Amino acid sequence: MAEDLETAARAAASALNAGRGTAADCTTLGWHRAVSGDHAGAAALFERALQMNPREVEAMVGLAGLHRAAGRLRDAALRCDAAIAAAPGYAEAWLERAYVMAAGGVMDEARRCYTEVITCAPGHGAAHAGLAAIAAREGEAEAGRHHARAALASDPGNTGATAALATIELEAGDATLARDLVEPAIARLANPSPERMELLHVLGDACNRLRDAAEAYTAYARAKADFAAVHAATFAGRPPHREFIAGVAEGLAAMDVSRWPPAHPKPASPPHLFVLGYPRSGNTLLENVLASLPGTAAIEEMPTLRETELAFLAEPEGLARFAGLDEAALAPYRTAYWQRAGQALGRDPGGLALIDMDPLKAIRLPLIARLFPAARVLLVRRDPRDVVWSCFRTSFALSNAAMDFTTLEGAARHYDAMMRLTEAALAQLPLAVHEVPYHRMVQQFDATTQDICAFADLPWSEDLRRFDRTARARGVSTASARQVRRGLFDGTRQWEPYAAYLEPVMPILAPWIEKLGYA
């Protein structure tokens, strides 16, 4: 197939150089450039193709793939939609749209798009592999095995199907089979790629389950190195995300909040809750626990404060300007928040207790304190060693923070920056905050959730114990999907087999281990 593309690209280049090239020639050469890693050159050729023929669907799909690789998911989705409108039966447009939806965590829509691919092309291996991956994520073992085997029948080297099948067997308790499935597939991939990265994460999980800490660490480290290599061009020249967090902390220190109103003594009615803390601390668990109550609506890691962030977090003096805004100036930003919340929920949040869960929204605490003084903040805390180890071993979607998690030192320094900002915000800002220790939530569930409900002015109910059903019904798009779906799980002290690998970052973590009571 690579040789065919090479031959076609040479013919297309020849035609274009001779002045007789077509939109199809531009598209062919664009795909060749994309496969070669020249994304800028590929984009220029796809755009040229669309100038020559606005209905060149392969060029639209090519641009969508480039946007997806760069994290511009909205642009990618728009290109897919245009391609589907032009050619509703074009399977590859539906496939790319499925990839975009999966990258954004919209799994129900990704599933629908993969199904459309199979409707257009019943034996499509990549679509079956995509459905297998979703089934594996959702714990649908039989459906996952069916689609994985269909994908492998069409394409025996399909790494996505192999990873999905291995994940299903791992969840079924056969870590040895999972390891044996992925090791040969990894050996066939010589260079960093998303496919090898996924397989390495599964291998790490299998070795971890087999209590082979050395092999697990090696697999995770290789996966993270692949992640860094695959996305190096996208993040070239950007400072680490922890530097952005430190910049927000500097801005917070310069804010004059003396004229801000205090946090309301009682929660809003209905309550408005922010579930914050840090990735891998138990935020998704708490979100689904609270979402199990009638009259609640939960938002999962959505940019609900986007307009305010762009206006006041993107420049050094932004928070100082924000601190001086009066109520009239704040009103448009509150309106924008509620509009985004409604879009995320797909309905008007009015009359519902809104749960806005996002571990990294702790960066936005200065905005939350001023915009929503009646809101309540639930701050989830977990042993810093478990948090940092889990961030290192977990496969995250592309984000600025995810690049910091590609090494244990990067993850530890990111955690340190976030904790410094969080502590400064708690000391300086008028906030109503309730800390939720993860270990207490999983070990003393009823007592902990009763305290949370009393703080948030929510009625406690035994429904809270059935959060796993809530997670299955709602769908979970975070990296915690499998853990939350299987019910209450005590994930404390998972760092211990990897203590030797954490030793170099202990000077960074030790103050937080002490402060949070995990010494």
Image (tube, grey):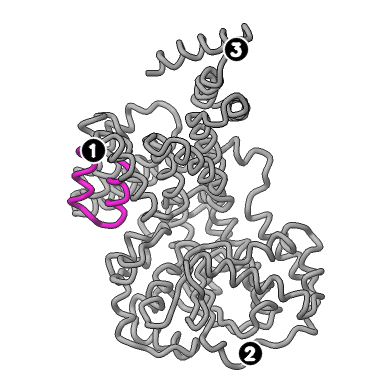
Q: How far apart are labels 3 and 1 at the CA level?
A: 45 Å
The vertical placement of 450 against 336, above or below, is below
Quarter of the image with the N terminus in it: top left
Q: In this rendering, which labeled residue sits more in front, label 2 or label 3?
A: 3
In the rendered structure, are the residues bearing label 3 and label 1 in contact, judged by CB atoms less than 8 Å apart? no
Q: Position of residue 383 (x, y in %)?
A: 46, 68
Q: Amino acid at mark 3?
A: Leu
Residue interval drawn in magenta: 129-150
| Residue wearing tag 2 | 264
Residues packed near mark 3 inside 10 Å, few (<14), some (14 to 19) or many (20 plus): some
Mark 1 and mark 2 lie on one chain; the one further toward the N terminus is: 1
Which residue corresponds to mark 3?
Answer: 16
Task: Report the mark closest to the observer, 1 or 2.
Answer: 2
Q: Amino acid at mark 2?
A: His
Q: Position of residue 300 (x, y in %)?
A: 47, 65
Tag 1, which secondary structure? helix
Q: Is residue 452 left or right of residue 180?
A: right
User: Along the polypeptide, which appears first: circle 2 or circle 3?
Assistant: 3
